[in-house]
Image (tube, rainbow, N blue to C red):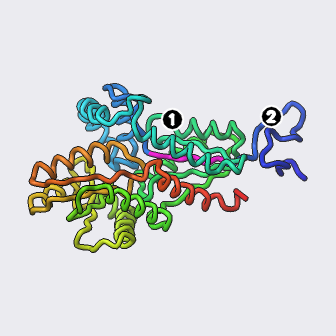
Amino acid sequence: MNDTTPSKPFLEERQHWPAGHPPVKYGRLGVLLLNLGTPDATSYWPMRRYLKQFLSDPRVIEEPRWKWWPILNLIILTVRPSRKGKDYASIWNNEKDEGPLKTITRSQAEQLAARLSAHPNVVVDWAMRYANPSTESRINALMAQGCDRILLVPLYPQYAAATTATAADDAFRALIKMRWQPAVRVAPSYHDDPAYIDALARSMRAGLAKLDFEPEKIIATFHGMPQKYHAAGDPYHCQCQKTSRLLREKLGIEKERWLTTFQSRFGNDPWLQPYTDETVQALAKSGVKKLVLVAPGFSADCLETLEELDVENRHYFEGNGGEKFAYIPALNDTPEGVDVIEAVVRRELMGWLD
């Protein structure tokens, strides 16, 4: 046996270093769940820090720095933190003093760890692309526990450069600083994974069964992106459309009752269409009285679902003549949601995990 072969599921340190070499833990597998992020608090300065980090990302805003810097720093970061802070406060987990995205992602990681507990050499952790806990800090924590192989799992079912790619970029920036890097895999998107579609369908059936009405229309709404990103080759739009079609077919819902829309546009450029808010208002004005929204692109509920969909779009619908409205929650940390993450993780650990 040479020095690089572990004699147990994991070794606390190498046994054959030259005299005086510092001990190094190795031999474990790390699984790092990655999500977008949430501000550390809802007051002005934490919101400003969060928005600055998010909106300074060139993957998110693909504009020349000379053009975007003054708009961001002199206009947006002056007025937007207070307004968005109020929105975050309306959905804040006051018990834990954190955003719901952080609460849910932590729970997803804890449940995944419990499901993988038969493998003592696997360590599960979680991180956020923006704000805390940072990706770099959790990669370092995994390395400190002896994880010399790490699976990165961006919790975005559909691939987009502004989500999946920037999460990987952030991890790779952390690796640049390391003398001894771990071997790294990045889980691919799972927009058409049967486990994902099945979990969505089970969740939707349960959600629809709880309603006291039969929806006339169902909208599958996805986070939007500028049309120019799609034109540049981003596969996100196509993957959203496929997810929506597969989910509708799995549920056996006729095409006439099902719409696919895009939400959360920002700025003046045209984004992917049709827009969710405009569609909701148009349906209400056309006489639709009973409407359900579902957001299959979100692995966890957050500001864009809890406030924008369940509050803002409810207001649009009811304010224009609609009567019955429901938002069906994301998969979150439900058994169905963790089923999907576990299926992705077990598949991507093949060859590493016996």
Residue 197 locus on image (x, y percent): 44, 65
Label whose residue precedes the other's in the sequence (2 or 1): 2
Query: Secondary structure under badge 2?
Result: loop
In depth, the one of 352 and 101 nearer the eye is: 101
Magenta extent? 30-35
Residue count near mark 1 (Cα–Cα under 10 Å), binned few <14, some 14–19, many ≥20? some
Q: Count of labels shown?
A: 2
Q: Residue at x 90, y 53 (%)?
A: 1
Is residue 32 part of the magenta span, yes or no? yes
Q: Which mark is residue 23?
A: 2
In depth, the one of 218 and 323 nearer the eye is: 323
Is residue 334 part of the magenta span, yes or no? no
Disc number lying in front (2 or 1): 1
In this view, 134 is above or below 339: above
Residue 93 locus on image (x, y percent): 38, 33
Residue at mark 2 to residue at mark 1: CA–CA distance: 27 Å
In depth, the one of 153 and 337 nearer the eye is: 337
Residue 134 locus on image (x, y percent): 51, 37
Q: Amino acid at mark 2?
A: Pro
Residue 172 appears in view: no
Side of 326 where 94 appears, left or right:
right
Residue 107 locus on image (x, y percent): 51, 42
Residue 10 appears in view: yes
Q: Amino acid at mark 1?
A: Pro
Q: Which mark is residue 121?
A: none
**Magenta span: chief secondary structure:** strand
Quadrant of the image occupied by residue 185: bottom right
Q: Residue at x 70, y 57 (%)?
A: 352
In this view, 89 is above or below 226: above
User: Which of the image's four quarters has the C terminus?
Assistant: bottom right
Residue, disc 1: 133
In this view, 297 is above or below 53: below
